[in-house]
Amino acid sequence: MANLMFADAECPNCGRNCGNGGRGDIFYCPSCGWKGKIKGAENDMKFIEEYIRFCIERDKEANLNEAIEKYLKIIGSIHDGEGGQHE
């Protein structure tokens, strides 16, 4: 399954909430039917890009820490004479 990134914004037509449905940069407003791209301020777009990069790095680090913990558990069981058996 592809990664989904849900985004909401203020509809430029009616001022209510619109969203992208989890994919892409085309937004749809269920209130007035407007459909199109949201033009964000330069600083807003930089903040969003930085936050996405932060989340990707955070998730990589979490996966690495989990892998290290599993590795240490296996090594520990080998040293304890369990022959590397683990649950």
Image (cartoon, rainbow, N blue to C red):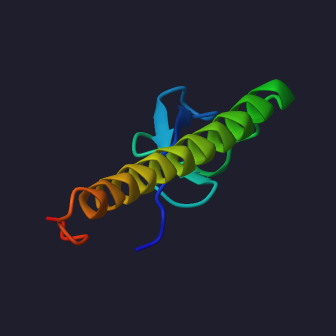
Question: Image quarter for residue 48?
Answer: top right
Rendered location of residue 33, percent (x, y): 48, 49
Please indicate, yes or no, whether residue 28 appears anywhere in the rendered image. Answer: no
Residue furthest left as drawn: 87
Rendered location of residue 85, percent (x, y): 18, 70
Using residue 44 as the reference point, say whether residue 61 is left or right of it: left
Q: Nearer the viewer, residue 9 or 70?
A: 70
Using residue 54 as the reference point, say whether residue 14 is left or right of it: left
Please indicate, yes or no, whether residue 62 appears anywhere in the rendered image. Answer: yes
- Which residue sits at x=68%, y=43%? 53
Rendered location of residue 60, percent (x, y): 55, 51
Residue furthest right as drawn: 42
Using residue 60 as the reference point, say whether residue 62 is left or right of it: left
Q: Is residue 74 above or below residue 7?
A: below
Q: Nearer the viewer, residue 19 or 29?
A: 19
The quadrant of the image that shows the N terminus is: bottom left
